[in-house]
């Protein structure tokens, strides 16, 4: 059930560093909200594939469902409900506002993952 895949681990580390740089240094209306959301599902996918011995499709679907759940929690103002509305970390990790564009970014990110996995599979 558990494995360690170095390729996915390295990709996850790189994506994590990119996400941290986006969070710390970029405050615009495109890269931070949309590219960040696009990349975060790829990061989560790479992290899952690092350790879990599951199919590409199952990992991608699980990450997408997880992202949808987080977005749904934003719709219901979960951070405020649990009393962490003043926490910068909680607002960054869980988010604080629902957006259909976020959903689109998540879907496009997972589609990108599936296309990349398909291309890499064909090259092996």
Image: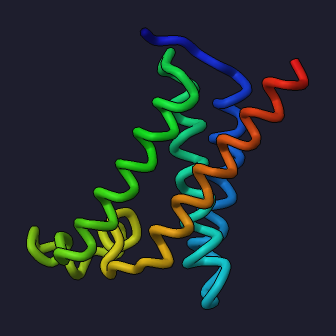
Res 81 quadrant in image: bottom left
Please state which of residues 48 and 83 is positioned toward the viewer in this rendering.
48
Quarter of the image containing the N terminus? top left
Figure disc tally: 0
> Picture quarter containing residue 99?
bottom left
**On the rendered structure, is 80 left or right of 17?**
left
* Nearest the eye: 109 or 39: 109
Where residue 65 appears, x then y in whole percent?
36, 48
Residue 83 figure quarter = bottom left
Q: Residue furthest bottom?
A: 29
Q: Residue at x 66, y 54 (%)?
A: 17
Where is residue 3 drawn, in percent x and y?
53, 12
Location of residue 26 in the rendering, given as x and y in whole percent from the top left corner: 65, 81
Residue found at x 44% / y 44%: 63
The quarter in which the C terminus is drawn is: top right
Relative depth, front residue between 123 and 94: 123
Q: Determine whether 33 is above or below 104 in the image.
A: below
Left or right: residue 36 versus residue 64 is right
Question: At which x and y percent is residue 117?
Answer: 72, 34
């Amino acid at each position: 059930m558990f494995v360690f895949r170095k390729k996915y681990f390295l990709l996850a580390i790189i994506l994590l560093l990119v996400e941290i740089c986006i969070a710390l240094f970029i405050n615009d209306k495109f890269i931070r909200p949309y590219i960040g959301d696009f990349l975060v599902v790829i990061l989560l996918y790479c992290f899952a594939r690092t350790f879990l011995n599951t199919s590409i499709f199952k990992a991608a679907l699980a990450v997408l469902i997880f992202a949808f759940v987080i977005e749904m929690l934003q719709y219901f103002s979960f951070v405020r409900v649990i009393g962490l509305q003043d926490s910068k970390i909680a607002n960054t990790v869980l988010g604080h506002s629902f957006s259909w564009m976020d959903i689109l970014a998540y879907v496009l990110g997972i589609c990108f993952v599936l296309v990349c996995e398909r291309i890499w599979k064909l090259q092996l």
